[in-house]
Image (tube, helix red, strand yellow):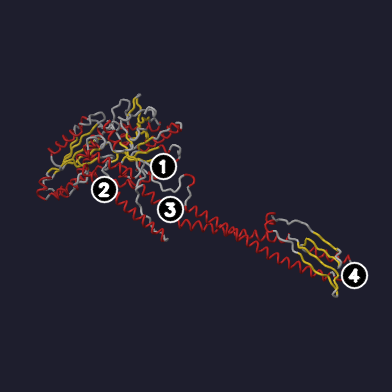
Amino acid sequence: MRPCRFVAITGALTVTLKRQLFILLTILLLLLLVGIFGVTVHNAKDDVVAQVRLHVQDTADSLALSVVPALSHRHMAQLELLVDGVFDRGYYRELAVRDASGELLVSRHSNAPPKQVPQWFINWLSIDVVSGVAEVSQSQKMLGKLHITSDNTITYRMLWGSARQTLKSFAVAGVVVWVLLALILRQVFRPLDELEQQAEAICRKDFNVQQPLPVTRELRRIVQAMNRMSRQLKVLFDEQVMQVEQVRNQAYVDSVSGLGNGRFFNSQLEARVNSTEEPFNGALARVQLSGLLEYNEQFGKQAGDDLLKQMGKCWRLSMEEIEGYCVARVSGARFAALLPNVEREQAKTTLAAALQAINKIPALAEGGNGLSVSAGMSCCSMGDDPQLLEVQANSALSEARQKGNDNLVVFDQQAHGDPLLPQLAEVEDWQAYLTNIINQKQVSFEFQPVLSCVDQSVMHYEALARLEINGELLSAGVFIPLVERYGLEERFDQLIVRSVIAALEEQLENERKPIAINIAARSIRSDDFIDWLITKVGSHGKVAPLLVFEVPEIAVRLSHGKLRRLAKGLKVAGAKLSIDHFGSTNSSFGYLSGLPLYSIKVDHSYIRDIHENLDNQFFVQSLVRIAHSRNILLTAEMVEQEVQWNLLRSFQLDGAQGYYLGKPTKSLKAA
């Protein structure tokens, strides 16, 4: 799947229009300044040469008058004295006095080169020698001639000083104009930059609208057209997502209460209790509203539906404190809830609070209408047969209904211990044991491959945390619930991240493979953990592109803002973010347009019987279209049969994992 990119030229030769125009204008500015500088210097040269010519001629005329007495009487000493006085005080290359016959009487020369003036400047100006000639005469009788040639040293020095000052002024003016030019171009091209960003966003199915509109009419029209296209595409994409959600809701959502229906609940229950990697432990609760039929006959079906809707809301809100919960209206006036990773007393307290909230509904609180509520619950301990959950919960519910209104019964309460605690003789205090594991960094890993549905190559590996006790590995489904019970999620996730990064850095670069790391939903709620994770990944830039962080879909609903911040931070650091157990919460798919995701993993409840369930097939096929339209990879989990694998490949998913494709192993090479 190729990313959509808006580039004119690939590679190192890519130059933006703004940069091209800026370079062109800079060259023109330099040429203009150089031209003006040259004209200015040459004009100054002409002015100085004219002044020197006038000065030399005036000097010649003045000296010619002064030497008349000395020349007429042939007083050579006096003549030389007059000539030396003029020559020494001025800048002259030659001064010569000749008599009427042309005989040289006095001559002075100076060949000193110009000082503090570069030769290239002298060669560039190349000032001609300026001469002045005057006749020495008395009573209309010519006594001789006087010839003076100027020394250009002073001329070059004057022009060089003026040129340097002019160059400094032009340099300052050029820098000011260059900065103003850059600011103007930046302002003018800002709408184009925003258009590029908008086009890139549209490729990601992020249909934003550019505001405010540019002042330039042509750009304004282009931006308006892009905004219209963005709005229309957003409508089309939303309709596509809405269609998939409607089909999903028709199959798995109760239209009255808005909760999952019996089909959804049974699918979740079977998928969770049959999970090889995350075995279910916790509680199954059921609540029954008795007298609904009579209530409908007395007050009408709409009143009964309103009552069920209120009851469903109370049921859902009461269970929200349990992470990973699943609630549904399974039939008629019966509701159910799966409460994973909770101890018996916590589950009982939660169920009692739900009963109390339901009994506060006006129709139940007023009484006198024959309505009553009962609840039953069963618990599954580690090692028990989870298939007995439904039978036990129904038995407890029947017993509660027999006892009367507002009764809660827990099945066989005395026969079970804490459903979370594994019965291991080696561990007496699990909290102390897990804390020591974190402090001593004694976590182990197994790696399960995620294979490409295109060529069956390895896309990445998922790191599955393990604890080793007496040479045997304890799966995450056994101890992670205890990690959550004792509030150790953040510390444990930090240990996992550090360990995986360290393992990658120990490998040779050509042997490194991308690895997916699971992050707990509660860790995502912590700003401190998010800051730590972004900083940690950013400080290991060489392995960051090999890290894929998987977060459960429940985190999207509970901590969408923080998850968005995490996704952007990981993207900047070079890592990737994936949504795990996608579709397990009946949440809206709207969040797909706001998160920079690498992939989404379809919940195994849709994969378990996909070869027999047409609704699941349509749901997964629709997800493929939605995900690929957003450049998001779509993978499946817990693929256990060949028929599932072949079907997913025909649906053009990007990847899949499961025991059929590869079991977890301690070695990446073995995986």
Q: Nearer the viewer, mark 3 or mark 4?
A: 4
Quadrant for residue 399, please give it: top left
User: If you read the primary sequence from the N terminus, does the residue marked by circle 3 or circle 1 appear first?
Assistant: 3
Q: 10 Å neighbourhood of mark 4: few (<14), some, or many (≥20)? A: few
The kind of residue on which mark 1 rests is: Ile
Decide: is 634 above or below 215. Answer: above
Q: Nearer the viewer, mark 3 or mark 1?
A: 3
The residue that mark 4 highlights is 73
Q: 10 Å neighbourhood of mark 3: few (<14), some, or many (≥20)? A: few
Quadrant for residue 642, please give it: top left
Which residue of the protein is positioned furthest toward the bottom in this rendering? 139
The kind of residue on which mark 3 rests is: Asp
- Does residue 341 appear in this view? no
Q: CA distance from mark 1 to mark 4?
A: 105 Å
SS class, disc 2: helix
Residue 523 lies left or right of residue 282; in this view the side is: right
